[in-house]
Amino acid sequence: MTATLIDGKAISASIREQIQSEVERLIGQGVRPGLAVVLVGEDPGSKVYVGSKERSCKELGIYSEVHRLPASASQEELLALVDRLNRQDNIHGILVQLPLPGHMNEKAVIDAIAVEKDVDGFHPINVGNLMIGDDSLLPCTPAGVIEMIKRTGVDIAGKHAVVIGRSNIVGKPVSMLLQRENATVTMCHSKTANMRELTRQADILVVAIGRAKFVDRSYVKPGAVVIDVGMNRLENGKLAGDVDFEDVKEISGPITPVPGGVGPMTIVMLMQNTLIAAKRAHGIE
Ligand code: NAP
């Protein structure tokens, strides 16, 4: 039996439509949501990401600015730019594309972004708010994972969710959000003993480790929902997830492909965060 595909492109397209009509409503009230993206250096992957963020803004009617600094820029220059954007009224969201060049202190830069404009959800105050269940700007990829599961019609409450990976940008926040949705959550990482025994108990398995096709069917309970966050570039140039999709789809429940799964959700959640930040800045419900 072959599993149902969770189509990230289709799900993100329907969220985009909702965002677009919300943006139009805000513009009608004199507020145009604005996103500033800062790119330091020439990292090819980062350039592609920044380009697609810019395009998405344009498509949805969100104002955008891209600030490009050379790799040789100093930390002070970058902090001065962030400070300016923090005070710029037409900018509601600020995203500094990571990774930054080695001589820069990423943590200091993230800390400098105004909490209410932190549309990546990486500022320690937003992370803390997520932890205590307060209203925060949620990190985009984890928020996208939850949205996908919900829009697939899966009721998360009461399910056993297993997350492989405990990074600050994916594994930890995904685990926290699943728990917030009333799943019982197990977190696995590189030091986890007998990982298969745990993952085989998962009703929902989220994989974010950065190892191409690592998870085969031996890790998966038949019928489980499988969300593959991994994005790994193979030697032949193709993109592969952390899950061996062809193998796992034979026994799993709904499963995300790579590409076309979690990837398209991340950018649409960034657009959503920009919209939320703009509404909050102007007291619009
Ligand atoms: P990361 O910071 O490198 O973290 C990887 C995590 O996986 C770590 O917690 C590590 O455990 C764990 N891990 C590594 N090998 C393992 C193994 N063999 N068994 C169990 N756990 C293992 O990576 P990340 O930033 O979370 O990214 C993970 C993947 O998601 C990457 O492929 C990345 O490209 C992708 N990603 C995709 C998107 C998107 O938009 N779709 C966004 C972000 C990331 P330890 O903590 O013990 O080292």
Image: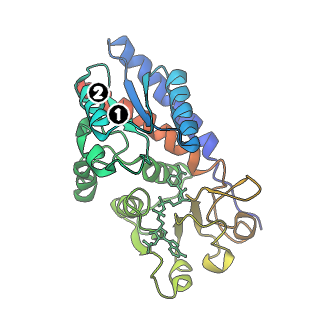
Q: Badge 1, how many Cα within 10 Å: few under 14, some, many 20+?
A: many
Point out which mark residue 94 bears: 1
Sequence-earlier tag: 1 or 2: 2
The residue lying toward the viewer, choosing from 241 and 200, is: 241
Residue at (37, 43) in percent of width and height: 120
Residue 195: image x %, image y %?
52, 82
Q: Are marks 1 and 2 in contact (CB under 8 Å)?
A: yes
Residue visible at 34% across and 32% down?
A: 93
How far from the left and from the top, in percent, is residue 90?
31, 19
How many numbered discs sit on the rendered protein? 2
Examine the image and state in which quarter residue 181 appears.
bottom left
Identify which amino acid the numbered label 1 is placed on. Answer: Ile
User: Mark 2 — residue?
Assistant: 85
Quarter of the image with the N terminus in it? bottom right
Q: Please, is residue 248 above or below residue 196 in the view?
A: above
Could one spot residue 10 in this view of the protein?
Answer: yes
